[in-house]
Amino acid sequence: MTDEPDGGGEASAETAPPTDDTAALADVLASDDGGPRDSTDAPGVAPAAVDALSDGTDDLDYDARTVSSRALAALGGDEGELEVDLDDLPDQERVVEEVLADVRDHFEAAEGRFGDVTREDIGTGFFDFSYLDRYEEIDRTWVNEPYAYVTVLYDPADRDYRYRVVEPTLDEFESYVRRDLVEYLRNSLMYRDLGGERTKESVFETEVIDLVAEHARSVAPVSLHKLVYYLRRDFTRFGPIDPVMRDPAVEDISCDGADVPVYVYHRAFRDLETNVVFGADRLSSFAVRLAQRAGKSISVSDPLLDASLPDGSRLQLTLGGEVATRGANFTIRKFSDVPFSPVDLVKWNTFSVEQMAYFWLAIESNKSLIFAGGTGSGKTSSMNAVSFFIPPNAKVVTIEDTREIDLPHNNWIQSVTRSSASDEGRGEVSMYRLLQAALRQRPEYLLVGEIRTEERVALTFFQAMGTGHTAYTTMHADSIETVLNRLQNPPLSVPRAMIQDLDIVSIQAQTYVGEDRVRRNRGVIEMLDPDEDDPTGLPTREVFARDARTDTHERVGESTVMAEIADERGWTDADLDDEIARREGVLRFLIEEGVDDYRDVAAVVQLYEKDPEYVVARIRDRGYDLPPL
């Protein structure tokens, strides 16, 4: 059950959290969050564990079938139609056996720190599989094997998908021992001087292993492993949402308030309701702990927080009260340790091979770009991916509010803004200050995470572009007209003469292909020289556009940018066509040969910049038709 209290956490929403490591460490241990629970039926832990951990304050009766029941009533249907024929669901025993086989295999290969865990010790009670009585399993992923997996389920009755976190169940005795261990660790570490280079994690590991070892005689080895999992989860990680944080398919995590399910944005299944639910008291405590994990403080007097978590994920947090009437809420936009590469975007049809070859040549030739689109349209991911085409030894400076850009370059200065720790604004490092500093660092390529509303940031960005720096950024706009309007008008107010230094605008969007929600490039537009008849205008030309009917990207206009590059390099039209064809061929080779690790993609792209003849020859030897050099 999510956030089941152990008698009440000591972290208070009304006071700023401790700032020293030992106090923060103890506070993290102060609340026993338990595991996720199903918001619609059986709890996620054994009933005895619920009774042992719960003080009754966080119980709720949330019925996810309400929508379908009301819809059927409105349509004149019978609620009996919601009943599911269990015989129509997939083989439940097969799912259980697959999961338990993985658990048994893991313990068989693992060292027995707390004694050997035999295959017979792992029974159907290790996890609560009762959800299989109602849902059809669509997808399953181990996120912390053998203790936690996540599964995407289909609810035939509600005609909807669900996201479920599954963690080990605890019986009454295990729950009692867990509470005892938490209490001991909290008291033991409250005034511990970490000192030196010891981290909270290292102190915890030493303390908890020694402590658990003392229970080895009275507690079964399999139980000790489960207990250590929960202690690690709640102390060194993210508590009940830790399995979700570990899922590479989840992009965003949203808690909208108390007593409602947490939602995730899944890369394949989009918005999904989870079985993780926070009660009001535990949510406030957890919100304070999230702020601590980000190295920040939050209070009733200052209830809003934007910060970065230790893994680079972006946190937006609001403390409950006057400004959040449903209780505290938070949104975590996860940072991926594995950046998307150009190959990924072509495989997903976000861009075509021809478009990606176009970007490759444009970026290598120092053309500046803006990626525009709505929220979640893939602006930053697209900018990051095409930045793989930056020459390997070029000096790159990136400036962001929250770390999202991840490049395979060594000559790269990564800068992140910092908010003030005082009411007077002392210690703040703004994007404008970082931009000013970046221009003194002589970057060849300047990447700014996003231009929002600050005029001097926009002016400095375009000033950098006009003084010979290749610059990329993103902004919220759904068309070239919106981009130009936002740039020219308050609050940005960029002069037209400066906007003319921009070369390319790429419009990104979330859209539908059938029933699937996908990210697509809607169009690539080039900025043209001012028309003699209208010297104050900003003429543009669309070079690529998406055909929604066929879900393809088509060339719809001649490229002035490519013509400029050909002229600069002394190429004929045939030379330009051959060069683009070679780059398309390299990308197709990587896709068809399954070379999708971003490090391998970057290595091939960088080798092409250094020795294109060698790369082309090797690919031609593999049977691919590329124009020779």
Image: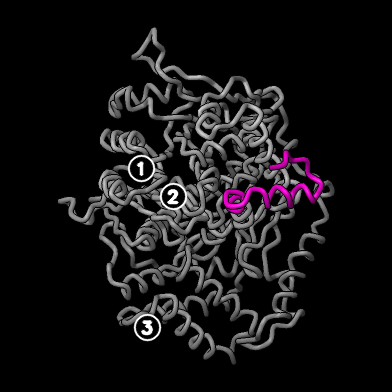
Q: Say what amino acid the circle numbered 2 marks.
A: Ala
Magenta residue span: 605-629
Q: Say what amino acid the circle numbered 1 marks.
A: Thr
First reached walking from the N terminus: tag 3 or tag 1: 3
Q: Residue at x 70, y 58 (%)?
A: 130
Give the labeled residue for mark 1.
325
In the picture shown, does residue 551 fall above or below 223?
above
Q: Residue at x 66, y 36 (%)?
A: 353
Image quadrant occupied by the N terminus: bottom right
Image marks 2 and 1: residues in contact by CB distance under 8 Å = no
Give the labeled residue for mark 2.
258
Residue 188, label in figure:
3
Q: Secondary structure at mark 3?
A: helix
Q: Nearer the viewer, residue 37 or 62?
A: 37
- Mark in front: 2 vs 3: 3
Q: Residue at x 58, y 78 (%)?
A: 173
Check the image and name the residue furthest to the top: 533
In the rendered view, does 190 fall on the left or right side of 179? left
| Crowd band around label 1 with a 10 angstrom C-alpha radius: few (<14), some (14–19), many (20+) | few
Residue 6, picture quadrant: bottom left
In the picture shown, does residue 108 fall above or below 365?
below
- Residue 227 in the magenta stretch? The answer is no
